[in-house]
Image (cartoon, rainbow, N blue to C red):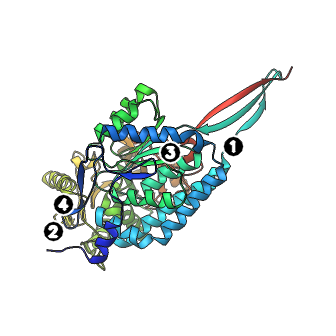
């Protein structure tokens, strides 16, 4: 049976395993702990503190107590803390990547890329901290002057997903720090170690006690609901499923909280007859296989013009079939395990449903050998429109290919979903690019590009894919309130 090396164990054991509240590490009030699993070995990697309602109250109170002083901290000082944390992330890139691979499964090369991507959010918002602006204007009748100002929303609750455990943390923590908000962070129970390591880095970078509080828990309902209804938290930022997002939105209504939700996706990937096929295949590969397909931005429905569908499917199948599946820490591995048994079971069910309805498997379609939750990269053709995988996120390395005959048909199919996070378009026609891009009902569009995420761009969706935006120049707005001071001039 495979096991961890001495270095791997040392990296894992170096991470604090308690709750981080008010600047100190502590056990859960109940003393409870829960296991974190290595999905490549299907074995317990570590245990961490299992927070409950009492711990949630303590974290909220710590954030509330620190809010006034933190809001009064100079923007430059807040930015410099983020800048120092950015540098520390790069200094510790290898160990952070290894930690991420062990708790989440992605290959080391991809994990290193996520650490660099995560660090960029801190660099971006370090620069945004000193650009929080306001305004001055004269009233229409000339009798008053208005001074418009921005201030932090207040203590915020940040809930991060397991698929990008470090980057989704920095994407939320960065603007909160820059804006002057204290926070309580609840990482996903499958991948808490990366966020705990990040808390240690921020503390080392000079973040004051109480500004960041981290609650690891296997009982999110017991922790999150009292935070939302307790009267201290003033904003929620959540990344996760649409079903959970709806529930949190309902719970947030009681205190009328500001809410940002980055929810599920069902991304269409459109390949027109004039597309550069080599570029389209590489784009589809990037949009599908990033993070083993476990991404809300993953291409979920590949619509290819009937004149090029055969060639496209053949090339994509060859590209995906050549990938090496295995433990992410091993040299030469391209595809790691899925997150857990339930995740792989869902992929199994969706592929089985599609094949049972007439889809053809060009490559993959089955488990890969190994102790963990491995699944072979899969390409399906002839997928019928009633296949379940076309109506929900696959969250795995499966590419279902459908065909279309004209632009209107492609757009109708692409928009036929309650989700609207991202879409992808491959064409060499500038006119078509604008025409199709404007008609796609998503918050983001990748034009001849399979990866759209960038800290400098506003990430988010429409319809049931969420509310608000993360990143870009508008990302900090989610953490600021606008107010004004009116003065008579007579």
Whether the residues at callouts 4 and 1 have beta carbons within 8 Å, the answer is no
Spatial distance from mark 3 to mark 2, Cα to Cα? 39 Å
Instruction: Tell me if I can see residue 90 in this picture.
Output: yes
Q: In this view, does 325 lie above or below 486?
A: below
Whether the residues at callouts 1 and 3 have beta carbons within 8 Å, the answer is no
Q: Earlier in the sequence, mark 1 or mark 3?
A: 1
- Residue 148: x and y in percent read 70, 34
Spatial distance from mark 4 to mark 1, Cα to Cα? 56 Å
How packed mark 2 is, by other alpha carbons closer than 10 Å (few <14, some 14-19, many 20 or more), is: some
Residue occupied by mark 4: 360
Q: Which of marks 3 and 2 is in front?
A: 2
Q: In this view, does 169 lie to the left or right of 135?
A: left
Q: Which of marks 4 and 1 is nearer the N terminus?
A: 1
Residue occupied by mark 3: 469
Q: Which of 110 and 453 is in front in this view?
A: 110
**Residue 122, quarter of the rendered image:** bottom right
Spatial distance from mark 1 to mark 2, Cα to Cα? 54 Å
Q: Which of marks 2 and 4 is nearer the N terminus?
A: 4
Q: In this view, does 334 lie above or below 67?
A: below
Q: Is mark 3 on a helix, strand or loop?
A: loop
Residue in the image at 29% along x and 62% along y: 103
- Residue 169: x and y in percent read 43, 53
Residue occupied by mark 2: 371
Residue in the image at 42% along x and 54% along y: 168
Whether the residues at callouts 2 and 4 have beta carbons within 8 Å, the answer is no
Residue occupied by mark 1: 133
Q: Residue 258: which numbered mark, if any?
A: none
Spatial distance from mark 1 to mark 3, Cα to Cα? 19 Å
Q: Is mark 4 on a helix, strand or loop?
A: strand
Q: Which of 47 and 351 is in front in this view?
A: 47
Q: Which of marks 2 and 4 is in front?
A: 2
Q: What element carries label 2?
A: loop
């Amino acid at each position: 049976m495979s096991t961890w090396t001495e270095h791997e164990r040392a990296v894992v054991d170096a991470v604090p395993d308690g709750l981080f509240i008010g600047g100190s590490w502590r056990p859960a009030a109940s003393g409870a702990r829960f296991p974190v699993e290595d999905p490549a070995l299907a074995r317990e990697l570590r245990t961490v503190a299992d927070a409950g309602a009492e711990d949630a109250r303590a974290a909220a109170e710590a954030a509330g107590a620190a809010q006034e002083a933190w809001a009064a901290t100079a923007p430059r000082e807040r930015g410099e803390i983020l800048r120092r944390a950015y540098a520390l992330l790069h200094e510790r890139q290898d160990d952070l990547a290894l930690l991420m691979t062990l708790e989440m499964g992605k290959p080391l090369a991809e994990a290193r890329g996520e650490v660099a991507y995560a660090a960029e959010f801190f660099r971006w918002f370090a620069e945004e901290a000193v650009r929080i602006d306001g305004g001055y204007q004269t009233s229409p009748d000339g009798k008053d002057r208005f001074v418009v100002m921005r201030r932090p929303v207040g203590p915020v609750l940040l809930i991060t997903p397991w698929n990008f455990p470090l980057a989704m943390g920095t994407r939320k923590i960065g603007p909160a720090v820059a804006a002057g908000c204290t926070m309580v962070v609840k990482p996903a129970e499958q991948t808490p170690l990366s966020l705990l390591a990040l808390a240690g880095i921020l503390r080392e970078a000079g973040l004051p006690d109480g500004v960041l509080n981290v609650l690891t828990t296997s009982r999110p309902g017991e922790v999150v609901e009292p935070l939302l209804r307790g009267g201290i938290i003033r904003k929620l930022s959540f990344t996760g499923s649409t079903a959970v997002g709806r529930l949190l939105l309902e719970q947030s209504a009681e205190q009328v909280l500001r809410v940002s939700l980055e929810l599920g996706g069902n991304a269409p990937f459109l390949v027109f007859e004039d597309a550069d096929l080599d570029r389209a295949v590489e784009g589809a590969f990037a949009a599908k296989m990033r993070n083993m397909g476990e991404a809300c931005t993953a291409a979920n429905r590949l619509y290819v013009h009937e004149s090029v569908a055969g060639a496209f499917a053949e090339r994509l199948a060859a590209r995906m079939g050549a990938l090496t599946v295995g433990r992410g820490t091993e040299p030469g591995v391209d595809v790691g395990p899925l997150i857990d048994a339930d995740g792989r079971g869902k992929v199994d069910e969706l592929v089985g449903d599609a094949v049972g309805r007439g889809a053809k498997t060009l490559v993959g379609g089955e488990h890969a050998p190994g102790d963990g939750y491995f699944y072979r990269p899969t390409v399906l053709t002839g997928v019928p429109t009633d296949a379940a995988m076309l109506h929900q996120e696959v969250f795995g390395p499966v590419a279902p290919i459908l065909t279309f005959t004209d632009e209107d048909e492609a757009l109708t199919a692409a928009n036929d979903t309650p989700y609207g996070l991202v879409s992808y378009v491959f064409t060499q026609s500038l006119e078509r690019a604008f025409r199709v891009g404007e008609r796609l009902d998503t918050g983001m569009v990748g034009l001849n590009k399979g990866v759209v995420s960038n800290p400098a761009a506003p990430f988010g969706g429409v319809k049931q894919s969420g509310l608000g935006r993360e990143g870009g120049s508008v990302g900090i707005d989610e953490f600021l309130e606008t107010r004004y001071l009116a003065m008579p001039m007579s």
